[in-house]
Amino acid sequence: MPSLKDLRNRIRSVKSTQKITSAMKMVAASRLRRAQEQAEAARPYSQRMERMLGSLAGNLKGMANAPKLLAGTGKDATHLIVVATSDRGLAGGFNATILRDARRMIRELTAAGKTVKLMTIGRKGRDALRRDHARLIVESLTEIGRPTLTFDAARDVAERLLARFEAGEFDACTIIYNRFKSAISQIVTRQALIPFVPPEAAAPAAGAGVYEFEPEEGEILADLLPRNLAVQIYTALLENAASEQGARMTAMDNATRNAGDMINNLNITYNRSRQAAITKELIEIISGAEAL
């Protein structure tokens, strides 16, 4: 049975922890609003650019003059997986869900006889995957979103991927990240980056016109596909940033509530122990007085 002093120290310690988690919740909430606005603002541009490139790529898919980012290398032997996590913890299951899906994809590709390589974005992903798959990691990037996530940072990641692709280091590239749905819900997403996979084209509307392109579709795609790669990475990182802040806010809110419950239970235990000690002292005093 802990002493009254131990209980007082424990209550003081939990109260200090509660103040920290409450402050972290408020900070995450303020950052979440800004990150959510950025992620939602980037979605329409990213989606429309994909649709536009998909309509262009439909005429060149499988042709000899198709850009390499569209046609691929002609092989499917080596896969590069970009695992996007956070640099900091205390975000609930945010990183765990991404890492779980990454490990699942590694097993699936390995079982199919493919060669797997990893690029990690974020310290948590690097540290976790280094324990099991250190030999697969070819590059690790940290502090991408510090102090703020910019398009230049995403373009730098895209240039690194393009350099490796041009050097023949991989045949296909996929990024794994969390898509923001709400503060309490994030969706683990796998998105193919290289080669470009055109979205399913909708049926053409009645009376739709026939377009002529200047320059040719191949030249337009050769210029826009690298730009689209940077846009898709930027969108994925924005979704990840919003998901991280939402998960952290929820985790800190739960931690604050749990600390409050623990303080209440400790106060009850402390009061009972104190009452028991007082009762024991009274019994000893009364027994001593009767003995006299």
Image (tube, rainbow, N blue to C red):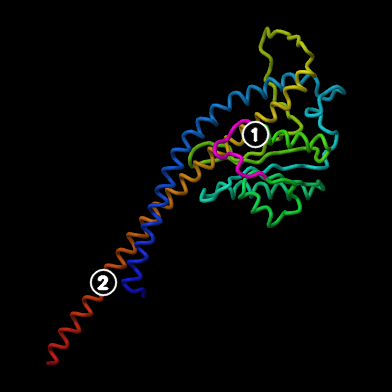
Per the rendering, the mark at residue 154 is 1
Residue toward you, 226 or 191: 226
Circle 2 residues within 10 Å: few <14, some 14–19, many ≥20: some
Task: Give neighbour class at mark 1: few <14, some 14-19, many 20+ (Cα, 10 Å).
Answer: many
Instruction: Check if residue 118 falls in the magenta segment.
Output: no
Q: Is residue 56 left or right of residue 95?
A: right
Residue that appears at 16% across and 88% down: 288
Residue 59 figure quarter: top right
Q: Residue at x 69, y 14 (%)?
A: 204
Tag 2 residue: 274
Above or below, 47 against 214 in this view is below
Question: Residue 217: image x %, image y %?
Answer: 78, 17
Please give left or right for residue 167 compared with residue 232 in the image: right
- Quadrant of the frame with the N terminus: bottom left
Residue drawn where x is 59% and y is 32% of the image: 150
- What residue do we see at 65% from left, 43% from top? 121
Q: Quadrant of residue 7?
A: bottom left
Indicate whether 120 appears above or below 265.
above
What segment is highlighted magenta in the picture?
Answer: 141-153
Identify the amino acid type marked 1: Ala
Residue 240 higher or lower than 220, as above or below: below
Mark in the foreground, 2 or 1: 1
Whole-angstrom CA distance, mark 2 to mark 1, is 60 Å
Please tell me which of labels 2 and 1 falls first in the chain. 1
On the image, the x and y values in percent for residue 71 come to 81, 28
Determine whether 99 is above or below 39 in the image.
below
- Image location (x, y in percent) of residue 98: 62, 46
Q: Residue furthest front?
A: 147
Question: Mainly helix, strand or loop, the magenta region?
Answer: loop
Q: Amino acid at mark 2?
A: Arg
